[in-house]
Image (cartoon, rainbow, N blue to C red):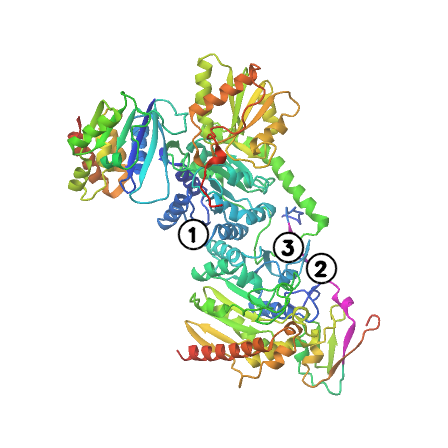
């Protein structure tokens, strides 16, 4: 069983990303998942979270994730927005961070004690390939780098989830996957 | 061939078209002065219970006393003042 | 299904326990005579609910349902949609509601149905208070009129339902009066043939609630029309037409003084009532010119 | 059978699509909104051939649905929270007029205080309005129970509407893998809608819901009671048929490791999986723990609950609604009354309100307390769990005296 938490800012597609990730593991990796998004008022710009639990067997747990194995941060400015992305994390927790800034990556390591960090400038990827500032598909590609899901499964789920703009988003995911490095 | 069949309906509904004997409410009843009446039908038109008929063949106004509540609208609306209300006594 | 136990000439039974001299009987009989049997009635609680029947006994020969006080327009909407889905666009789905069920608690559902232009006929019979439950004031109760909840006389005027209706741009709306049945029948006939949301607002004195003799309910209604307290009009394709027009507006004093519910009206209120009548009439005349 | 990804709201919409309603009247409300939206999409893209009425309130949604279904078509609507509260009056019309509407309700707390999140007070407040109530444990069950509910509600001897309750966000927005029947398989199971009781038909006249005299009202209510009695049997039959057709077992109540359990929790809704997870954990540690999930809450399966819990000595019934002023919260009161002839110790445990998470840790704590009672170390346990310290002092302000 793997417990994952997505952090983002309203409008970045974090909740959509969680649903697509669930589909990738459920339909294309023959596993099971539940997602519990934590919604507030629907506002652009406010922090949003999603909790995902993945297992080889049907997932019994239907609650939030308190001790994540993997966290995905869609926006590196969250560190300055009163959001404790390190909550419940241990040295073993893997961070996937959308950041193009070495300093920022170091701040995340220093502040929360992450030992394994996968970084990718998903925002730039999204701007280049999708021509817009929605990094969710790119960051799903980055998440695949951790090995929790294959990039092929993720691409298929992205294709399903984004409909007409599926291919562009698949390209963003693939590009981000290739750019993601262990920082 | 299916014959008539009883069916149970559950819950509230009305399926029997019937009438209350509102004639029993009457304290006064309309009385037509046949000399004044011109059989114009206005009394019939404005009768709330629709119980007045103009019988042109026999030149008379007929009331269905089962339903006439004795409200007096017919008398009030009659352009010829041919209807007055008289005290109700017994049936018919 | 309907078992006829006591025949009637029309679609309404002759013996209904509405009050002596109540105009609703006349309205409902005339409306159904024009609409015919291909009609469904939605009736909320109120005086008209006497025509829903009691227990197993029905008072109408048309199909119908008694709704709640506030949802006549919504139930009618659903019925019309159900029929439409089954290919029936001919049955006239009619809501028949009092002023309280229309201008007070039912205004939201009516507004929704008008905005969506549902294919229904909405008829409001307006006796200017909650008469069925003991003459409580509604937003149709006029300035100066006493009711059991405005015992000293109402201190504000009534809602102008026609202007609310017109603000929704429905294809056809009209006012009518129980005192002018040929006009009422003509308007019902017109409304019957229009597709979309049609609204009729029909004035109907309540002898008990207004404090008038039973026999005078038509006469008082006629006075109301003659003095302009009730204006007969039509709204069709965005155009207002005053029809039929009174020769000249009479004085409202006679209309007001004939009714005991105005027993507490002050001289100032009476002046205001008369002023409002004249000003509203002028306003409608201006609208007619547009 | 196809496997698809749905969140709970998506599964509800899929079931509605498979049941082919002719009229849809819905008003959006968090967290139900995506049902209203997706149904509108389905009508727009032709996957549902229905009239979509964009009503101005939930009250009108239910009113329009009643009117429409009385003309002889299946209808669809959905709601949540205060929307259901606004419907309350007309919910009674649907059940009293025996209009077998099936409605997904996305559970959300009632106001005040304002909250957008899951608890069961909204549907619990409707528990005596004459609707059948099923509470889903998973997204799969949303689809399964919706499809079954059409069959149960529309059964000629039941003729009673159903609420299929799904927890806001925990199910409504939780993406899960769902096995669905094909359109034809589902249609063969659900069957076309047929009017079986009262109807509005200009060619076959009756007047529905006229004033009922005192001399008949009691009997009309008794008719409804008989409908509920039959619903309990029909539910079991329909669940059995569903399992035969689609291979998935549904439960009115679902016992889990209860045969030899010494302590057990009774749950309802999405928390139930977490309870099982913790039972597994405790069993691995040698604790004789068990769980019972109630799926069918109306009619209340008192006999089955008595039967499945009869050997358990200490039971915690978990309510996701406060049950203010009651002798225990709603589910607990019902369980206690079902078990009145046993000497089990039954506790009403209240929590998870307004989306407060009921986690595995919460269940561990609850089981610890139940075990303490079982061992005789405690005689009573707190009825509210996961309560903050000093709840009365949440707002402490300076005032000018």
Residue C277 belongs to the span the image colors magenta: no
Q: Answer yes or no: is residue D255 visible.
A: no
Query: Relative to residue C290, is residue C96 drawn left or right?
Result: right
Q: Is residue D374 left or right of residue D219?
A: left
Residue A47: give x, y in percent of width and height: 31, 38
- Relative placement, left or right, of C79 versus D177 is right
* Marked residue nearer the N-terminal end (1 or 3): 1
Viewport quadrant of the C terminus of chain B = bottom right
Q: Nearer the viewer, residue D119 or C248?
A: D119
- The disc placed on residue D210 is 3
Residue at horizontal 60 percent and vertical 50 percent from the top: D198
Decide whether residue B20 is among the magenta residues.
yes
**Residues drawn in magenta:** B12-31
Residue C5, disc:
2
- Which chain letter matches label 1? D
Residue C133 x/y as whole percent: 65, 60
Residue D178 in view of the camera: yes
Q: Where residue D200 sits in the image (x, y, percent)?
A: 57, 54
Write down the residue under mark 1: D52
Q: Could you say which is closer to the camera, residue C225 or residue C8?
A: C225
Foreground disc of the pair 2, 3? 3
Name the secondary structure under disc 2.
loop
């Amino acid at each position: 069983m793997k417990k994952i938490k997505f952090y983002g800012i309203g409008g970045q597609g974090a909740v959509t990303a969680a649903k697509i990730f669930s589909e990738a593991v459920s339909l294309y990796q023959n596993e099971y998942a539940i997602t519990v998004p934590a919604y507030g008022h629907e506002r652009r710009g406010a922090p949003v979270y999603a909790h995902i639990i993945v297992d080889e067997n049907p997932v019994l747990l239907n609650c939030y994730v308190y001790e994540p194995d993997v966290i995905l941060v869609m926006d590196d400015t969250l560190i300055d927005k009163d959001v404790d992305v390190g909550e419940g994390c241990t040295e073993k927790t893997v961070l996937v961070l959308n950041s193009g800034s070495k300093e920022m990556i170091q701040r995340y390591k220093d502040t929360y004690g992450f030992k394994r960090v996968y970084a990718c400038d998903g925002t730039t990827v999204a701007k280049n390939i999708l021509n817009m500032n929605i990094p969710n598909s790119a960051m799903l590609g980055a998440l695949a780098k951790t090995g929790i899901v294959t990039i092929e499964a993720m691409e298929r789920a992205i294709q399903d989830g984004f409909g007409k703009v599926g291919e562009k988003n698949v390209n963003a995911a693939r590009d981000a996957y290739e750019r993601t490095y262990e920082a | 061939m299916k014959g008539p069949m009883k069916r149970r309906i559950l819950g509230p509904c009305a399926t029997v078209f019937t009438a209350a004997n509102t004639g029993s409410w009457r304290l006064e009843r309309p009385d037509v002065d046949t000399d004044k009446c011109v059989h114009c039908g206005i009394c019939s038109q404005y009768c709330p219970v629709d119980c007045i008929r103009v019988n042109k063949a026999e030149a008379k106004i007929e009331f269905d006393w089962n339903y006439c509540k004795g409200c007096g609208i017919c008398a009030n609306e009659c352009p010829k003042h041919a209807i007055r209300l008289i005290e109700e006594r017994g049936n018919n | 299904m309907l078992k006829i136990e006591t025949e009637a000439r029309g679609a309404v039974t002759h013996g209904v326990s509405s009050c002596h001299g109540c105009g609703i009987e006349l309205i409902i009989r005339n409306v159904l005579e024009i609409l015919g049997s291909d009609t469904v009635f939605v009736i909320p609680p109120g005086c008209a609910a006497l025509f829903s029947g009691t227990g197993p006994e029905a008072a109408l020969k048309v199909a119908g349902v008694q709704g709640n006080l506030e949802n006549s327009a919504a139930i009618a909407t659903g019925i019309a949609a159900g029929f439409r889905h089954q290919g029936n666009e001919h049955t006239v789905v009619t809501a028949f509601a009092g002023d309280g069920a229309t201008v007070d608690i039912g205004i939201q559902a009516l507004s929704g149905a008008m905005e969506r232009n549902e294919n229904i006929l909405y008829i409001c019979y307006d006796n200017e208070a909650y008469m069925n439950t003991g003459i409580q004031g509604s937003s149709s109760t006029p300035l100066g009129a006493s009711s059991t909840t405005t015992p000293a006389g109402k201190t504000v005027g009534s809602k102008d339902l026609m202007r609310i209706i017109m603000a929704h741009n429905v294809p056809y709306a009209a006012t009518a009066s129980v005192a002018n049945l040929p006009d009422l029948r003509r308007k019902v006939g017109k409304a019957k043939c229009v597709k979309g949301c049609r609204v009729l607002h029909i004035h109907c004195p309540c002898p008990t609630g207004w404090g008038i003799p039973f026999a005078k309910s038509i006469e008082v209604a006629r006075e109301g029309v003659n003095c302009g307290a009730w204006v007969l009009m039509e709204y069709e394709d965005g155009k207002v037409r005053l029809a039929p027009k009174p020769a000249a507006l009479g004085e409202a004093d006679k209309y007001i003084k004939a009714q005991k519910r105005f027993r507490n009206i002050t001289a100032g209120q009476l002046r205001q009532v008369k002023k409002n009548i004249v000003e509203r009439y002028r306003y409608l005349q201006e609208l007619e010119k547009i | 059978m196809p496997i698809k990804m749905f969140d709970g709201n998506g599964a509800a919409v899929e079931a509605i699509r498979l049941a082919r309603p002719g009229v849809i009247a819905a008003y959006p409300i968090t967290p139900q909104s995506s049902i209203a939206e997706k149904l509108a999409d389905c009508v727009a893209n032709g996957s549902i051939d229905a009239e979509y009425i964009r009503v101005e309130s939930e009250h009108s949604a239910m009113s329009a649905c009643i009117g429409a279904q009385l003309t002889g078509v299946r209808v669809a609507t959905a709601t949540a929270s205060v929307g259901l509260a606004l419907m309350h009056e007309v919910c009674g019309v649907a059940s009293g007029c025996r209009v077998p509407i099936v409605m997904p309700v996305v559970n959300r707390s009632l106001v005040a205080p304002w909250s957008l999140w899951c608890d069961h007070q909204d549907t619990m407040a409707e528990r005596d309005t004459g609707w059948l109530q099923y509470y889903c444990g998973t997204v799969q069950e949303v689809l399964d129970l919706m499809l079954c509910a059409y069959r149960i509600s529309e059964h000629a001897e039941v003729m009673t509407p159903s609420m299929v309750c799904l927890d806001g966000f925990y199910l409504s927005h939780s993406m899960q893998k769902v096995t669905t029947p094909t359109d034809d398989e589902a249609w063969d199971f659900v069957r076309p809608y047929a009017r079986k009781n009262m109807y509005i038909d200009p060619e076959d006249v009756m007047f529905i819901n006229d004033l009922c005299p005192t001399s008949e009202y009691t009997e009309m209510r008794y008719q409804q009671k008989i409908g509920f009695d039959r619903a309990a049997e029909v539910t079991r039959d329909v669940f059995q048929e569903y399992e035969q057709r689609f291979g998935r077992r549904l439960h009115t109540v679902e016992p889990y490791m209860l045969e030899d359990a010494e302590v057990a929790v009774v749950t309802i809704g999405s928390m139930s999986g977490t309870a099982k997870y913790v039972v597994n954990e405790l069993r691995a540690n040698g604790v004789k723990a068990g769980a019972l999930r109630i799926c069918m809450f109306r009619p209340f399966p008192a006999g089955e609950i008595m039967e499945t819990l009869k050997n358990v000595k200490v039971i915690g019934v978990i309510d996701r609604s406060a049950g203010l002023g009651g002798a225990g919260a709603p589910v607990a009161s019902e369980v206690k009354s079902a078990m009145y002839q046993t000497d089990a110790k039954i506790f009403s445990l209240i929590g998870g309100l307004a989306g407060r998470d009921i986690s595995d840790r919460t269940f561990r704590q609850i089981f610890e307390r139940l075990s303490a009672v079982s061992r005789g170390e405690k005689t009573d346990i707190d009825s509210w769990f996961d309560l903050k310290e000093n709840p009365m002092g949440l707002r402490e302000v300076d005032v000018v005296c």
